[in-house]
Amino acid sequence: MSRRAPAPPRARPPRRPALRLLPRLLAVVAVVLATVLTGPAPAARASVTLTRVSDFGTNPGALTMYVYRPAGLPAHPPVVVALHGCTQSAQVYADNSGLPRLADQDGFLLVLAETGTANNPSKCFNWFQSGDNRRGQGEALSVRQMVSHAVTAYGADPQRVYVTGLSAGGAMTAVMLATYPDVFSAGAVVAGLPYDCTRDNSPYLCMNPGVDLNPADWARRVRDAYPSYTGPWPRAAIWYGDQDTTVVPRDATELRDQWTALHGLSQTPTRTGTIGPDATRQDQYLAADGTVAVEVDRVPGIGHGTPVDPGTGGEQCGGTGAPYFLDSICSSRWIARFFGVDTTESGGSDPGDPDPGDGTAACWTASNYAHVQAGRAGTSGGYTYANGSGQNMGLYNTFVTHTLKESPPGWFTLADTGCP
């Protein structure tokens, strides 16, 4: 199990550095990265085949877009956007996160954004740069353009778009949820930070020891990202290792405060349980309609990285063939479950498992209006959300029709492609 501490994200160098300082800067970066990445060579593993997309928009953030399209992808699939951590790449994240295997199983389109050393010496997304973490500009706009391309080129469902990422990619996930709440239904921040912490703090202070603001102040920073927005806020899952010394667990608490305040919820969890093989603690914060609006998953005994659980079991995924993938729990499986794109039936008995029963399910096909009236869904901001899973079902009216599956009792998921 990896316990290696990662390199902190490094800010983009000034646009016009003095030439005499540039060699020294590059030398320091090289030494830092070499020190962090020194260790036994990982075992060789087959790489996931990704497709590079060259023309997806104006791309002001100079990012690279890759797509993993499963064979037999259903019509109008969900989209999951994945953002790698510092020193990583889209390929490394695809090969080790377990997301491509879940895309095959669950039928979603996987979009992977990649940054490089031209943007940041350590290949970190610039979550801390005002030119990249604001709506309509920089890296944030580039990721938004990738989603638009996925919808138009692959026929993806614009109502089911999700984002997740690690470390700097996790912080950039929070950026995307804050700047484009009209695009993303939910996101999962893995070892990331609250949005706009660096408005008046350095990135390193935000990472460790962290910045303490009250929930209302954190929420205001998100609202400031898109002041005219009046729709529903994305749902947020927050994943942290409880031994993380790079982005400390305090940041998980501040993220929780930010997103529970946005949803108008208390910072006291509605329900708490443990999940997975390592007894990860899961705190859930439920909206009035039963939707899980915010979720915090604290993984015991690990440091900074994406929790994975290599193997072929239904609840396993990912690999430890690269730094910052830590053998513990298949976080990608639980994140897919939180998004509502997980179509597997685990048959487990963990608290919080969407299908801990005997695999049987009841199904209903009706309009969104009828689902709400029957108590199978709720509404927020004119949209309809399945109770339990919180999946976005589209506008609240009598014209939009969906099939909902209930398993266990009180937990509803979209089942438009077939329901037993």
Image (cartoon, helix red, strand yellow):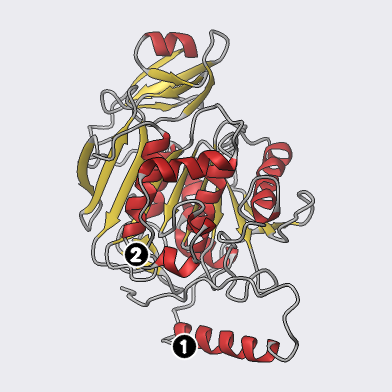
Binning the other alpha carbons within 10 Å of mark 2 as few (below 14), some (14 to 19) or many (20 upward) gives many
Residue 63 in the image: x percent, y percent?
Answer: 69, 60
Q: Are marks 2 and 1 in contact (CB under 8 Å)?
A: no
List the residue tagged with mark 2: 248
Residue at left offset 69%, top offset 87%: 22
Q: Earlier in the sequence, mark 2 or mark 1?
A: 1
Q: Amino acid at mark 1?
A: Thr
The percent coordinates of residue 391 (x first, y second) are: 45, 30
Q: Quadrant of residue 262?
A: top left
Using the image as rendered, state which of residue 419 and residue 291 is in the foreground.
Answer: 291
Q: Is residue 367 among the parts visible in the rendering?
A: no
Left or right of 223: which side holds 351? left
Vertical side of 28 occupied by 137: above or below: above
Q: Which mark is residue 35?
A: 1
Assign a secondary structure to mark 1: helix
Residue at 35% from the left image edge and 55% from the top image edge: 212
